[in-house]
Image (cartoon, rainbow, N blue to C red):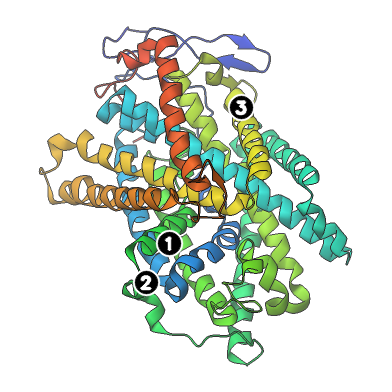
Amino acid sequence: MTQQSTRGSAPTSSQPFTDVHLVHSSTLHDAAGSKHGITKKGLKGGQLGLLAVVVLGISSVAPAYSLTSSLGATVAEVGKQLPAVFILAFIPMILVALAYRELNADSPDSGTSFTWTTKAFGPFVGWMSGWGMLAANIIVLSSLAGVAVSFFYVFLGEVFANPDLAALADNTFINIATCLVFVALAVWVSYRGLHATKLVQYSMVGFQIVVLLIFSVSAIVNATNGASTTALAFDWTWFDPTRVDSFSQLAAGISLAIFVYWGWDVCLTVNEETKGTKGTAGKAGTLTALVVLGLYLVLIVATMMVSGVGAEGIGLSNPDNQGNIFAAIAGPVMGPVAILMSMAVLASSASSLQSTMASPARTLLSMAHYHALPPHFARVSKRFGSPGFATIAAGAIAAGFYAVMTIISVNVLNDTIQSLGLMICFYYALTSFACVWYFRQSLFSSVRNFFLRLLVPAAGGLILTVVFVQTAVSAWSPDFGSGSELFGIGLVFVIGVGLLVLGLAVMGLTFLARPSFFRGETLRQDTPALVVPE
């Protein structure tokens, strides 16, 4: 038995589409025996427990990939203060994670930032928050694919002792073609649902962490026994952020370091598909952030001790090393087992490419569910309970973005990572402020609410806003990032800010085509939460 609600509307009816069905309607109905009004989106629930969600989060963060991609660029900004900057970057991350946890406990929804920001600030701000999240995911998916391609050919070169095989990654046509294959494989696994994803992730994440710890031990041994000519003695001053030369360099370093933590929010994106209570996803996000922090500090200190921050040899400032740190230093550090590092980064980027696909697919699904995007994106696979159409669309867009960036940028990895920092700061800050405004009636009702609904999210949002503004100002210069430019403007600015401007244009077209969402007919602050286990 159903009862129509007057508090908003959400998609409910279905329509066959080969293996998928379309959840779409202009009316809202309460589920049988339910006191709430929002219907589920067709996703298959009860697939992931706490451990599985944490593993998914670590996979999405991709420690090996993230560090090999960002250490060189971050050292170029902050030098020996690398550990200090990584700790500073973690502060807004954990603050945002706690804000996400509060919002998820109140309104668990696969749309996360999009849904919560819409409920707090209305449809226009909410739509842009969803766009920012989608843009960040598309950027990182393309970057993940790029690293996977590089390490795939490095791995082949090491296996067959043929440097020419490793050099194939430098061939633009082969690089792009291989990237398309990797993305297609990731889409295939993601389309098959979270159960298939989980089976892939346990082995690949476990292998990645073991190899990174082996590398850390080898690096420290090499640094202390005199085997490395670039070694540095451990120094506590590395943890002092005041030694960074300028605020702009500090902000740029934090923006880059934020990238290496990003990905934990996939834990919240799968909140409609977890086991246990509605707190499972929030706990998993916080645990993921803490585990990654510990792993990063060990790796960063070990890498600095063995490589140093100079521009010679395996130094982290050597331009020949900066695009792919572990590829450059694994041989000297690990010797005959260096191939394990190539395998670990390949596993890291490939598994993250697949797990990260979950976020944009479910964001697209949620936006379509509330009529903020065309209904095709709300199609869910009947067989696998996954957002089938949205998964394919996310993969196709990411592959296209990578192909374009590979052609126009002299250093696609560096430019995409730095523009990614802008996207992350944008939608994380909006979500943090949304937490404060959404809970404004209860901020002072208890000490707990004062800290977790006001102080913590407000501080996280303010920090990220400052980093966003400073990075955007710096990125205007062509000297920022790889040095690539369009019409005299730095490519990092063009990608980061340009994508937000593009989002405004797409939102305008969406408003004309699908006005119901923007009129508050499908999602408002008083739209009730999903029915989930307490």
Q: Secondary structure at mark 1?
A: helix
Callout 1, which amino acid?
Gly
Name the side, left or right, on which 335 lies relative to 66.
right
- Picture layout, residue 149 above or below residue 257: above
Residue occupied by mark 1: 253
321, 267: nearer the viewer: 321
Q: Answer left or right for 330 relative to 431.
A: right
Q: Nearer the viewer, residue 339 or 105?
A: 339
Is 64 left, or right, of 102 in this rendering? right
Query: If you read the primary sequence from the N terminus, does the residue marked by circle 1 or circle 3 appear first?
Result: 1
Does the image show residue 280? no
Which quadrant holds residue 356? top right
- Residue drawn at point x = 43 percent, y = 85 percent: 235
Q: Is residue 439 visible?
A: yes
Quarter of the image that includes the N terminus: top left
Mark positioned earlier in the residue sequence (3 or 2): 2
Q: Position of residue 343 (x, y in %)?
A: 72, 61
Please give the label number shown on residue 244: 2
Q: Amino acid at mark 3?
A: Ala
Could you tell me residue 77's position as x and y percent?
A: 46, 66
Q: Residue at x 43, y 41 (%)?
A: 268
